[in-house]
Image (cartoon, helix red, strand yellow):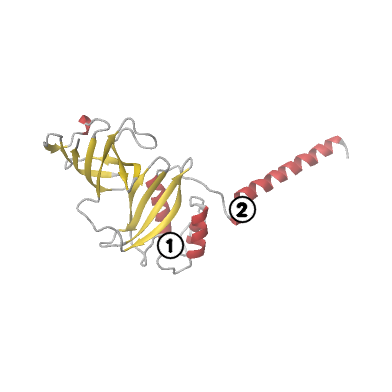
């Protein structure tokens, strides 16, 4: 074999070896590697759950279907493995929606969000719904869904305000991925510090000064790290403030 043929053979073997390594790395045990979403935490969860709900309602026509979604690379490997064991057709409650009855519509609300972790609550929009999915995300260059936990009957009763917390205001100095154009509340929850929620204001938002004067909120006059208590309703974007009180 001449030198030229030897070089060609070696090159082919290198290419083949590289392909074997690539596919074995990304398909160990028949599963795909971990991928992440470039969307924010709420949209990452919302998109996945919208697809899952459609796959349940349209089992023969939905694309992606339920089986494909269970293998989604946007889920952690542990979650994919668990769903493969639990997600038999007709399973009750559904291991992703965590409901015994397929809801017509679902709603997603942020529980907390940090630089490398977030948690959202997904539940039916039906009145008096008590079943919900607690979705925890992790971040590694982008968001992926790490765990899904089902809760039934132990959701706190509906209060006048879905969100009531004390914390500090941040805006321009808020770290990424949060938007420095919006005010945020940084607060502690269940002993975990550094939780963040974006704050939004409208004509009904009332603010109470340190002197006890209550008036329509003027976010332009807020100062960073001011300590406040907030009562708000949660939306997919964050917390819509109803009452904000400055405290010492």
Q: Horizontal and vertical percent for residue 151?
A: 35, 61
Q: Horizontal and vertical percent for residue 53?
A: 40, 59
Judge by depth and name the residue closer to the eye, 125 or 145.
145
Labels 1 and 2 touching (C-beta < 8 A): no
The residue depicted at 27 percent of the width and 44 percent of the height is 239
Secondary structure of the residue carrying tag 2 is helix
| Any part of residue 237 in sight | no
Judge by depth and name the residue closer to the eye, 239 or 193.
193
What is the number of callouts on the image? 2
- Quadrant of residue 195 in the image? top left
Q: Horizontal and vertical percent for residue 5?
A: 83, 39
Q: How many angstroms separate mark 1 from mark 2 (CA)? A: 24 Å
Secondary structure of the residue carrying tag 1 is loop
Q: Is residue 1 left or right of residue 41?
A: right
Q: Is residue 54 left or right of residue 241?
A: right
Q: Horizontal and vertical percent for residue 42?
A: 37, 47
Q: Quarter of the image containing the C terminus?
A: top left
User: In the figure, 37 relative to 51: above or below?
Assistant: above
- Quadrant of residue 16 in the image? top right
The residue depicted at 22 percent of the width and 30 percent of the height is 220
Residue density around tag 1, few if under 14, some if 14–19, many if 20 or more, within 10 Å: some
According to the picture, the residue beneath numbered tag 1 turns out to be 95
The residue depicted at 76 percent of the width and 43 percent of the height is 13
- Quadrant of residue 11 in the image? top right
Judge by depth and name the residue closer to the eye, 11 or 128.
128
According to the picture, the residue beneath numbered tag 2 turns out to be 28
Q: Quarter of the image containing the N terminus?
A: top right
Residue density around tag 2, few if under 14, some if 14–19, many if 20 or more, within 10 Å: few
| Any part of residue 152 in sight | yes
Q: Going from the N terminus, do you reach mark 1 or mark 2 first?
A: 2
């Amino acid at each position: 074999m001449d030198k030229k043929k030897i070089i060609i053979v070696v090159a082919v073997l290198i290419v083949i070896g590289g392909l074997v390594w690539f596919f074995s790395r990304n398909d160990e045990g028949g599963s795909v590697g971990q991928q992440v979403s470039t969307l924010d935490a709420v949209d990452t969860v919302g998109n996945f759950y919208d697809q899952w709900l459609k796959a349940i309602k349209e089992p023969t026509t939905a694309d992606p279907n339920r089986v494909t979604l269970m293998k989604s690379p946007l889920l952690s490997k542990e979650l994919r493995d668990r769903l493969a064991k639990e997600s038999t057709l007709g399973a009750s409650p559904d291991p992703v929606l965590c409901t015994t009855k397929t809801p017509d519509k679902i709603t997603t609300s942020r529980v907390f969000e940090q630089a490398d972790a977030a948690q959202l609550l997904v539940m039916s929009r039906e009145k008096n719904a008590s079943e919900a999915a607690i979705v925890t995300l992790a971040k590694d260059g982008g968001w992926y869904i790490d765990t899904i936990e089902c809760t039934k009957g132990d959701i706190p009763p509906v209060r006048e305000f879905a969100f009531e917390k004390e914390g500090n205001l941040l805006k321009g100095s808020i770290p990424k991925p949060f938007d420095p154009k919006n005010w945020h509340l940084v607060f502690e929850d269940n002993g975990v510090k550094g939780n963040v929620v974006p704050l939004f204001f409208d004509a009904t938002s009332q603010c109470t000064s340190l002197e006890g004067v209550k008036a329509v909120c003027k976010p332009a006059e807020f100062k960073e790290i001011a300590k406040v208590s907030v009562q708000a309703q949660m939306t997919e974007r964050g917390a819509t403030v109803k009452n904000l009180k400055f405290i010492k």
